[in-house]
Image: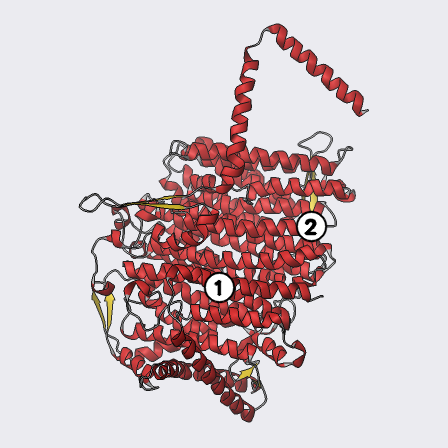
Amino acid sequence: MAIGLQLLVQFCQMALVLALAPLFAGYVRKVKAHLLRRQGPPLAQPYRELLRLLRKDVVLADSASWVFRVAPYLIFATTWVAVSLVPTFATGLIFSYAADVIAIVALLGSARFMLALAGLDVGTSFGGIGSSREMLIASLAEPAMLMVVFTLSLLAGSTQLSSIAASMQASDVGLRFSIALALIGLVMVALAENARIPIDNPATHLELTMVHEAMILEYSGRHLALIEAAAFLKLLLYVSVIACVFFPWGIAVSGQGPAAYFAGIGVYLLKLAAGGFLLAVFETAIAKMRVFRVPDFLGAALMLGFLATLLLFVTLAG
Amino acid sequence: MALAGLLWCVGALLAISVAAIPAARSRWGTPAVYGAALCASTIGLGLALVSLLGGGALLGALTLPVGLPWLGAHFRLDALAAFFLVVVNLGAAGASLYGLGYGSHEEAPGRVLPFFPAFLAGMNLVVLADDAFTFLFTWEFMSLSSWALVMAHHRRPGNAAAGYLYLIMASFGTLALLLAFGLLAGPAGGYAFAAIRAAPPAPGVAAVVLVLALIGAGSKAGLVPLHVWLPLAHPAAPSHVSALMSGVMTKVAVYGAVRIVFDLLGVPTWWAGALVALLGGVTAVMGVLHALMEHDLKRLLAYHTVENIGIIFIGLGLALAFGANGMRAAAALALTAALFHVFNHSVFKSLLFFGSGAVLTATGERDMERLGGLIHRMPLTAFVFLVGSAAISALPPFNGFVSEWLTFQAILVSPALPQWLLKFLVPAIGALLALSAALAAACFVKAFGVTFLGRPRSDAARQAVETDRWSLATMLILAALCLLAGILPGYFIDALAPVVRALAGAQLPRQGELDWLTIVPVAQSRSSYNGLLLFLIIAFAAGLGAEAIHRWASGVLRRSAPWDCGFPDASPATQYTAGSFSQPIRRVFGSVVFRAREEVRMPPPGDLRPAQMHVRMRDVLWDAFYAPLAGLVAYVADRLNKVQFLSIRAYLTLVFGALVALLTVLAVWQ
């Protein structure tokens, strides 16, 4: 019975993130539009886009193989599972012990692996350029992410996100320089991983500047809908990770009952609103950089993560 | 007793090797030799597995009256040997099964068949040896039989040079091991391992032995900077032998290092751990960067062997550092990670080399720039190669991820180490490991994407056909093992427990009985991973998505020409190639590591000649170490050439002078 209840809460989390992800993307677009003195599309626009794509036929390139057709399902499923392992409104959910934060990073790596392969599958130059650049970005962003993870795990003595959140909530961590470095590093990685400005532009279709969009250029219909949904989920994942690790206040603990859960969901929504607003402000204020400046940007993130870890290695005794 | 059975298997392999010389001429020679080798190595695998899991009841020692007359040949089967025998015989059985199909394409079976079983026997014997003489003798036997296999196609361009370099590096490595064992045995000459264990060397001697053992075993395993022969020699052999050399023989070298450093040297020192882990980290990153620049499929895989050996040595180095500081549980964690990666790498590397062999037989090409689109022609090979690529890129839910995850967990325990150098070094090694994992994923997107996806770049690739059933069966079994070890890692970690207990003095908590088969190396609140659950949830989520789409979305699918932003080009030459895929990474890393320089030759306007781009890369290590050394040897040989043409009086003077000099040395020594 207890397990049934825990599973129910876990599935609620899975449903919640799936339902919220397009809304969050729409919210960021709306805020960006307002900052530019435009009215912007309605909040529900991403849902409409997904539904429209689902209704459309798939036009598949002649040279596409089964990898191209299977990849969207796997990418969607892997990303969805990765988000549902992150504590959003409550920590210690039943699946959260299946994977720690290193495994979550690796799960996103699996999704990216499939996506990059799908980009190469049709055999066009745009798909190739997207895959190649995506893997370049990933080869720097992933180590940077892992260094940030190292910092947090050393502070909390754990790689479980639930334990990290609980430990950051406790007052004995205090303000540390490493935490600030890790936060900056993680934000930089999150921007790069989600193809946001200044790394990539989610709204562009100008060939030579795009990375993510180039990779998925050949996708259409339901396949494209799944990939878009996965991208929304991934954005939500990074914002949720930042929220639960650096701003863990108000998060419920598994087994506290429905009232605590609902309070947790309310706080979580507030955090998402704040995070999305900041993202929109940042993206409006900054210009996209050239592709070959990206390694400098991510190298800085890697160095920040490394410095944060090194500081902890030196200061933590025993 | 299991040891006697294993020695009988080795004897059988040697007998097959002799019988193969006449049999190679007959039509049935190839299947008979591989079939017999398959039987012998499967029995060996069974015996090794039973003795590893049997909890010590089947382990034992044996002395045969061969070898040095006053020493005899000592053999011993302990937990460590049993584990490595599992790795050796699993790879051997796989290669033999694969050889049943692949061997029929061999144009000169007489050059492969006699040496193949001998090579298998040699690797088994190294692991079983229990005295220095037997170890070195069988080590050389293994090296020479594999050298003969590398030279099987010695007329192909480059192979003779590869074999020559291999021979030099192998002799150099054995020389270092010879000196190491000489120092371990001491002036009394106690060459049996039991005698060495009873009298561990003094700290100064132990330091020299450690460095010599790292040179000796590291040159065989491919530690940077001793790796240069490996990417040349491993791909030169027939593909099932490449798989054995990369997947298994490097593990025998790791065994040599573990046996000397963990078992014979006694209590480790912390700087030994720092040295080994640093070498491992540098090896991992250098290996994967070289692999990214490589367009020859088999050579790319060989460079990845270098990378994975680096990951294994990171684990071994951490285990030494923890062991030196008395942190036994942490040492057990690091050692488990290293040994689990030994097993995992042997599985997926064999699988990938088998896949490249299938591509080679189907197309005759190793150059990825001339492949492409093979997934349409060889769907099963493509599928298993994809599984192997995901496993080696450390992606969940496959096995490569679990051992790298354990290595990361070991790194996260290390702030407790007291030495300052280690405190600075270990996070840097963690960053190197993370970097190599990410770059490996990029490299295998390239390897799989350019070889199997896209459109064919040559007629050979356009007309490829799926490989034979034996090869497919082998690859499917190995792919299943990759998944199995990834989703049920607890059982594999438990099987390693006796080995780890013997070497590190502690072991990980038993994993097989935990709820839901989660693996928990230290404590649940600290870290846990459950590959099975993850696999099931992903399958469930994908199924749910597929079902929802099947039910509510449009199911229509139309085929048409690629969109490509409105400008599709029919020529396959417009696709991304391996070179263009890795160009951004070359610009970021290669300008320093390889001194890569790009030169674009643009014809003047109006000139119709095509523009050209040339890329020059230099192997910095080769320039720094090997080229000057080769130059020095050539110079000395040139000068010594004069000694060949002296008169008899001059020779007599030389002999006399040498005698006097030796006697003087002896007189001073006494």
Q: Amino acid at mark 2?
A: Trp
Q: Nearer the viewer, residue A243 or A112?
A: A243
Q: Nearer the viewer, residue A236 or A68?
A: A236
Give the residue drawn at x 58%, y 73%: A160
Give the residue drawn at x 51%, y 72%: B533
Left or right of B475? Residue A48 is: left
Q: Nearer the viewer, residue B126 or A306?
A: A306
Residue B634 percent across, percent down from the top left = 52, 25
Q: Where's the C terminus of chain B, which quadrant?
A: top right
Calculate the distance from the C-alpha at mark 2 to the C-alpha at mark 1.
30 Å
Give the residue drawn at x 55%, y 47%: B88
Q: Quadrant of residue B595?
A: top left
Residue A125 percent across, percent down from the top left = 28, 58
Report if residue A184 is visible in the image: yes
Give the chain letter at badge 1. Answer: A
Residue that label 1 marks: A142
